[in-house]
Amino acid sequence: MKRIDKLVLKSFWGPFVLTLCVVVFIFLMRLMMFYIDQFVSKDIELAVFGKILIYFSLITIPIALPLAVLLSSLMTYGNLGEFFELTAMKSAGISLTRAMRPLLIVATGIAIFSFWFNNKVAPWANLKGYSLLWDIKSSKATLSIKEGIFYNDLPGYSIKADRKEGDLLRGMVIYKHQENGVETGNREIILADSGRMFTTPDKQYLIFELYNGNDYTEYSDNSSMSYASSGPQNQLAKFLRNGFQHYKLRISLDSYGLKRTDEQQFEYHEYMKNLKELATLTDSLKKDLKSTLASTSTTSRQYYSYQFKQPQPPILTNPTVSTTAVAGPPAIREGKWIDSLLRKPVDSRLRGETTELALSQARNMLSYAESNQTYLKEKAKTVNRYELESHHKFTQAISCFIMFLIGAPLGAIIKKGGFGIPVLVSIIFFILLYVLTLTGDKYAKDGLVWVPAGAWMANVVLLPVGLYLMKQARNDSRLFDKDVYTIWWERLKKRYTAWRAGRLQTKVA
């Protein structure tokens, strides 16, 4: 490896790693802000929280790679241009293309890595991350009792404390609704002057340690009271009161905490599939959609009374007569059957019934057509989503290479390094890439454009921009030089002044 290659690569890797970490951090903060209400008030262990951050960091790497390549390549050649190192290379006979060759190879390698990452690591990270996020969202909030308000999130219990003094609860009321797992209503009530609440070390049980109270339990007595010898029998309700000075109530916390769901329930999503699985599922979904479209005409026959109703052959009473010798009735020709029926001289009452029947069938057919159209659109959208995800395995990789084609010549033209102008220009192009990608995806999913056209729209639009900037950089263009536009504006003003003076002379003559 030559010294010029080492110089370029040394200038590239630092901004690349830093930019990649910053972009991943920004996307993680976006995730945290979006799901902040799901994370707070949940008893999530630090290890679980660290896992979900790692999974979503891996998910955001394919999105962050194009921006990291764009910004780092722009900063690399911007610094080389700012300190006249590119000028020294050109004076030594080294072309700009030769100076860009090491990063061209690196950008190709990053694009290959991005494709491998999208195909192998990203589906696994999506499955792990989103399944864990679903379990966190499904878990209940941490137990929190407020003063004077009944807490009803514990299954089978309603708990209230009049006031809280540190960890001591005053004026406690506990209603127990279950007995041996069966709903029994408010059959048991516990009143206590004070108490404390804590969980066992394994967090499997919640313990209420109560002081100076009574436990009221209602039970039924099957003994009967007879109003007469054959009168009805009544069930008497009785209460049993047990006083206590110290009492421990143990409540299971099985409904709390994080419960892991089977990850196979999330594997149907297109983000959890690699390229081979996506191709297989897309082919199956296309066949299913094609068979559904083919069966539409068959299933719609039930809504028509004339166009699709073929006459039945006559029943032969003489078995000795050959069926081939008897000619069946002619097939019904196409035509306006309803209109022909209404033109016949029939009774007005029968005509009204026929009209109502036709109107009812028309409404049924319209409802069927609308529901069937919605069903077919959803099937088509599902096919488009899976096919679109297959293309994104390639488009996100190619976008890394295109961002290098934009960033490297831009740095050579701007000749500014650091985190000033390069960051601004990089954000503009990245937003353009992001907006074009979202627009193409939306059009492709809705079936407005061909799926490959929507998936590759961003790359197709930005590739000519990169090639144009490369051409301008090789020709030492002053595309972003302020003096160029100042001179151009002055020339334009002089031409306008001369043109206006010529008009005035013409009018005077």
Image (cartoon, grey):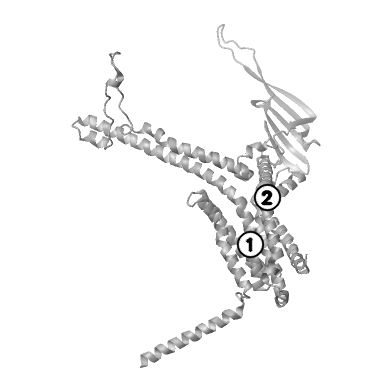
Identify residue type, mark 1: Met
Q: Is residue 420 above or below residue 55?
A: below
**Residue at the spot x=68%, y=50% of the render?**
116
Q: Which residue is mark 2?
A: 116
Q: Is residue 44 above or below residue 400?
A: above
Extreme top residue here? 229
Q: Quadrant of residue 242?
A: top right
Image quadrant holding the N terminus, namely bottom right
Task: Please provide percent x and percent y for residue 53.
Answer: 72, 49
Task: Please provide percent x and percent y for residue 74.
Answer: 67, 67
Question: Does the image show residue 415?
Answer: yes
Label 1 vs label 2: CA separation? Answer: 18 Å
Extreme left residue here? 345
Left-right relation of 488 to 89: left
Q: Is residue 458 above or below residue 143?
A: below
The tally of labels here is 2
Image quadrant holding the C terminus, namely bottom left
Do labels 1 and 2 touch, CB within 8 Å?
no
| Secondary structure found at label 1 | helix
Task: Please provide percent x and percent y for residue 390.
Answer: 59, 48
Left-right relation of 99 to 497: right
Identify residue type, mark 2: Trp
Q: Earlier in the sequence, mark 1 or mark 2?
A: 2
397 or 424: which is nearer to us?
A: 397
Q: Quadrant of residue 206?
A: top right
113 or 147: which is nearer to us?
A: 113
Q: Which residue is mark 1?
A: 403
**Residue at the spot x=57%, y=66% of the render?**
465
| Secondary structure found at label 2 | helix
